Image (cartoon, grey):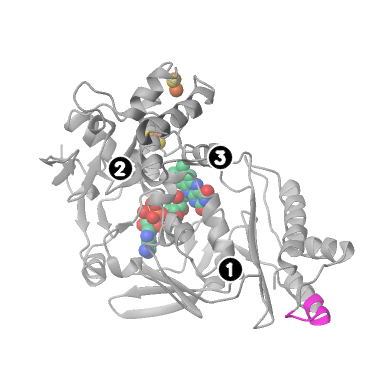
């Protein structure tokens, strides 16, 4: 049985995929399929034209040279096997789904779905990463902070493909934490990424599953930067209990959580404060 | 579309929203990969796609064109069970058997990469496969037995 009007195009290269994308209205991109196929299998998505982008070799590249450029087709398994240019991203990849999901799921798919629970996204926020979008008209770069506009909403235009994410190598002082209801295969109830870029004297905090988009926590970032100003950016330090608690409080205060099936807003604020405090203690000792 | 299944090139028609799992089971007569959740949670549909362990329910059938698929059916050599299958039978790791094909494929994928996994590594490698019956103890034993059986420890 062939459903009339439904077609599948297997992209040969990025140009070919972009051309197909711009020639068909309402086309849907397909990478690893771990989000889209669930939608299709449950009848929530009925794409009439699918463009398969999983063989676009250009998007599998991972360049690391002080500045990292990770192609959209890099899978979680590759983030674990190769050095992905961010320890926090590696930790986030480690928590995603199962081996089956990590073998198929991609960075570009996480960005394409743009769920507040997407686990790479708080890390991209904390790294102050840039999303690279390409259409037939050319490339444009969007700061991750400006990329997501709401739950499963982004500034990506229908004629654009996410080709990569880019960020400056922030060094080893970074971590990702996530709270869920069990150890394997779990959607985050709350997630947090903390990056302390000692060379650039910058702190980034990204919060996941705690609002309509991924959020930064600017007050917590400023507070932590103050601690490193005092202690010396290039030095290991042990933040005091009081400082850690304050950092946790400020991180949680930036959240805009809701009650849902996975947890209450109050619980999310609580675990964010705990995670932030622990993350600071962990990262401060890495120099 | 054409794809390679268990070493043979096959030509098959597919409806566009059909998953690779449906193509395998209903169009190619390979019912070994099981269909339970269709959302990547249970692992009973696990196959190797170009050598990587994936859930066949999450692969669009039409997107598998030109690719190489291996299913649980490819493991036994005629009537001779693969060491992984043998170990699952011998260790009593099969009860209702629904999860078994997926677990066999996942175990095969693990041992191919890591011939002597620790218990922790086994748990991690099988974390995408759910079994309602065994409580997993016998399965972990079977994987260790398969590792010894395959590599003669
Ligand atoms: C059992 C299970 C467990 C999971 N666990 C986690 C988890 O722990 N953490 C987590 O974050 N996610 C999880 N996911 C969700 C999913 O695996 C991730 O979001 C993954 O990154 C999606 O990537 P994909 O390549 O499979 O995307 P696809 O399903 O191929 O695509 C997803 C969406 O993005 C679009 N898209 C894909 N690539 C691009 C691109 N390059 N440019 C523009 N748009 C694009 C598609 O059109 C589609 O709308 C899980 C999913 C399953 C089924
Ligand atoms: S049927 Fe594919 S994972 Fe459950
Ligand atoms: S033996 Fe019944 S589900 Fe595993």
Give the vertical position of A85 relative to B130 (above or below).
below
Closer to the camera: disc 2 or disc 1? 2
Is residue A163 in view?
yes
Q: Tell whether label 1 touches label 2 (CB within 8 Å).
A: no
Closer to the camera: disc 3 or disc 1? 3
Q: Nearer the viewer, residue A283 or B113?
A: B113
Image location (x, y in percent) of residue A26: 30, 59
- Range of the magenta residues? A227-234
Image location (x, y in percent) of residue A266: 76, 48
Image location (x, y in percent) of residue B112: 36, 43
Classify residue A18 by image quadrant.
bottom left
**Is disc 3 placed on a helix, strand or loop?**
helix
Q: Which residue is mark 2?
A: B48
- Residue at 39%, 65% (x, y): give it: A72
Chain at numbered mark 2 = B
Residue B79 left/right relative to A199: left
């Amino acid at each position: 049985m062939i459903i009339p009007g439904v077609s599948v195009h297997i992209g040969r290269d990025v140009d070919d995929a972009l051309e197909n994308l711009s020639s068909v209205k309402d086309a849907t991109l397909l990478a690893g399929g771990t989000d889209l196929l669930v939608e299709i299998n449950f009848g929530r998505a009925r794409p009439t034209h699918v463009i398969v982008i999983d063989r676009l070799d250009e998007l599998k590249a991972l360049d690391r040279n002080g500045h990292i450029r990770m192609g959209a087709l890099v899978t979680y398994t590759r983030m674990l096997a190769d050095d992905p240019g961010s320890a926090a991203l590696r930790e986030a990849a480690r928590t995603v789904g199962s081996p089956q999901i990590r073998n198929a799921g991609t960075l570009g798919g996480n960005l394409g779905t743009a769920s507040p629970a997407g686990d790479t996204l708080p890390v991209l926020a904390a790294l102050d990463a840039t999303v690279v979008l390409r259409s037939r008209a050319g490339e444009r770069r969007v700061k991750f902070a400006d990329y997501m506009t709401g739950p499963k909403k982004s500034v990506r235009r229908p004629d654009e493909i996410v080709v990569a994410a880019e960020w400056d190598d922030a060094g080893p002082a970074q971590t990702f934490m996530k709270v869920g209801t069990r150890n394997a295969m779990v959607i985050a109830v709350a997630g947090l990424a903390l990056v302390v870029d000692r060379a650039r004297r910058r702190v980034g905090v990204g919060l996941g599953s705690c609002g309509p988009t991924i959020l930064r926590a600017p007050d917590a970032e400023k507070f932590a930067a103050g601690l490193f100003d005092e202690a010396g950016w290039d030095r290991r330090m042990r933040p005091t209990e009081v400082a850690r608690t304050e950092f946790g409080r400020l991180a949680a205060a930036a959240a805009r959580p809701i009650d849902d099936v996975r947890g209450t807003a109050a619980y999310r604020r609580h675990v964010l404060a705990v995670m932030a405090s622990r993350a600071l203690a962990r990262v401060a000792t890495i120099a | 579309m054409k794809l390679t299944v268990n070493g043979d090139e096959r030509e098959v028609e597919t409806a566009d929203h059909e998953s690779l799992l449906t193509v395998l089971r209903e169009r190619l007569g390979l019912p070994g990969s099981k269909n339970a959740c269709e959302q990547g949670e249970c692992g009973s549909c696990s196959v190797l796609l170009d050598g990587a362990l994936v859930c066949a329910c999450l692969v669009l059938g039409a997107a598998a064109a030109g690719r190489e698929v291996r299913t649980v059916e490819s493991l036994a050599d005629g009537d001779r069970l693969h060491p992984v299958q043998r170990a699952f039978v011998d260790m009593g790791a099969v009860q209702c058997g629904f999860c078994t094909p997926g677990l066999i494929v996942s175990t095969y994928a693990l041992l191919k990469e890591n011939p002597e996994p620790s218990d922790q590594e086994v748990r991690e490698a099988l974390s995408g496969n759910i079994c309602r019956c065994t409580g997993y103890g016998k399965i972990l034993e079977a994987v260790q037995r398969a590792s010894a059986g395959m590599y003669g420890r």
